[in-house]
Amino acid sequence: MCSGALYWSQLAAVHIAAGDPKRGFRATTLQGLHPKTKIHWGPMEAESQALLQDFFKRKRT
């Protein structure tokens, strides 16, 4: 999601279940968020990561 859209939507919180260090949401993007927005990292991270990996593995085969 575009950080500009996150800023203007003034969301109270963003939950990022599974991170992607190469192409995902980065700490530098935090500067573009609305000051009231709270970031919650890793709720159900293992389950989310497994679902995403399985999904893309099936897409490639």
Image: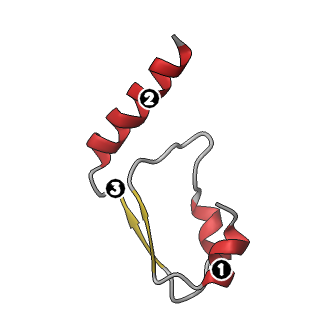
Mark 1 burial class by Cα count in 10 Å: few <14, some 14-19, many 20+: some
The residue singled out by tag 3 in the image is 42
Label count reads 3
Q: Secondary structure at mark 2?
A: helix
Of 32 and 59, nearer the camera is 59
Amino acid at dot 2: Phe
Q: Residue at x 46, y 84 (%)?
A: 12
Mark 2 burial class by Cα count in 10 Å: few <14, some 14-19, many 20+: few
Mark 2 or 3: in front is 2
Of 13 and 35, nearer the camera is 13
Amino acid at dot 1: Tyr
Amino acid at dot 3: Gly
Are discs 1 and 2 less than 8 Å apart at CB? no
The residue singled out by tag 1 in the image is 7
Mark 1 or 2: in front is 2
Mark 1 or mark 3: whose residue is earlier in sequence: 1
Of 1 and 37, nearer the camera is 1
The vertical placement of 29 against 8, above or below, is: above
- The CA span between labels 1 and 3 is 21 Å
**How far from the left and from the top, in percent, is residue 1?**
64, 60
Q: Quadrant location of residue 2? A: bottom right
Mark 2 or mark 3: whose residue is earlier in sequence: 3
Q: Residue at x 55, y 16 (%)?
A: 60
Q: Secondary structure at mark 1?
A: helix
**How far from the left and from the top, in percent, is residue 31?**
65, 75
Q: Secondary structure at mark 3?
A: loop
Are discs 1 and 3 less than 8 Å apart at CB? no
Residue 55 - label: 2
Q: Residue at x 29, y 58 (%)?
A: 43
Q: Residue at x 35, y 35 (%)?
A: 51
**How far from the left and from the top, in percent, is residue 61?**
51, 10
